[in-house]
Image (cartoon, grey):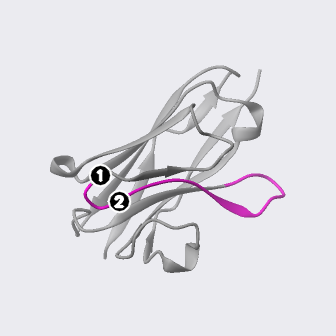
Amino acid sequence: QLQLVESGGGLVQPGGSLRLSCAASRFTLDYKAIGWFRRAPGKEREGVSCISSSGPTTTYAESVKGRFTISRDNAKNTVYLQMNSLKPEDTGIYYCAATTFGCGANAALYDYWGQGTQVTVSS
């Protein structure tokens, strides 16, 4: 079964950092754009960031620009989301997803999803 597995979540104080990883098993991420989405308590799922299949194109939600950085290491079949200067409003479950289409905020275009990793920003 094709899988995406997120890791790296946890509890962090405001202003802290976390690095999320999204690893694929049983398929290659080489030709897929990878997006990070999050669902905050009581809110709709939102797109956070995306990286194109070859890597040069990245997109970010306005709320995370300048604080989050997405990157990929195709040799390790893994995509990362470096999150700095975290705020309480960044709290939520973070999901990575893969698509054969280009980056976009429409979650319906993503074929594979991970189970999510919890990020809690609190003092």
Judge from the rendering whether residue 79 lies leftward or rightward of residue 116; answer left or right. Answer: left
Of residues 118 and 108, the one nearer the viewer is 108
Q: Residue at horizontal 80%, vertical 59%?
A: 43
Residue 103 higher or lower than 41, as above or below: below
Residue 47: horizontal and vertical position, in percent?
60, 58
Report crowding for label 1: few under 14, some 14 to 19, many 20 or more residues within 10 A (C-alpha): some
Report crowding for label 2: few under 14, some 14 to 19, many 20 or more residues within 10 A (C-alpha): many
Q: CA distance from mark 1 to mark 2?
A: 5 Å
Judge from the rendering whether residue 8 lies leftward or rightward of residue 122; answer left or right. Answer: left
Residue receiving disc 1: 55
Q: Residue at horizontal 60%, vertical 21%?
A: 16
The answer to whether mark 1 and mark 2 are in CB contact below 8 A is yes
Residue receiving disc 2: 52
Say which quarter of the image contains residue 12. top right
Q: Residue furthest toward the left?
A: 75
Amino acid type indicated by mark 1: Gly
Judge from the rendering whether residue 102 lies leftward or rightward of residue 12; answer left or right. Answer: left
Which quarter of the rendered picture does the N terminus lie within? bottom left
Amino acid type indicated by mark 2: Ser
* Residues rendered magenta in the picture: 39-54
Judge from the rendering whether residue 29 lies leftward or rightward of residue 99; answer left or right. Answer: left
The local secondary structure at tag 1 comes to loop
Residue 94 higher or lower than 81, as above or below: below
Residue 10: horizontal and vertical position, in percent?
58, 34
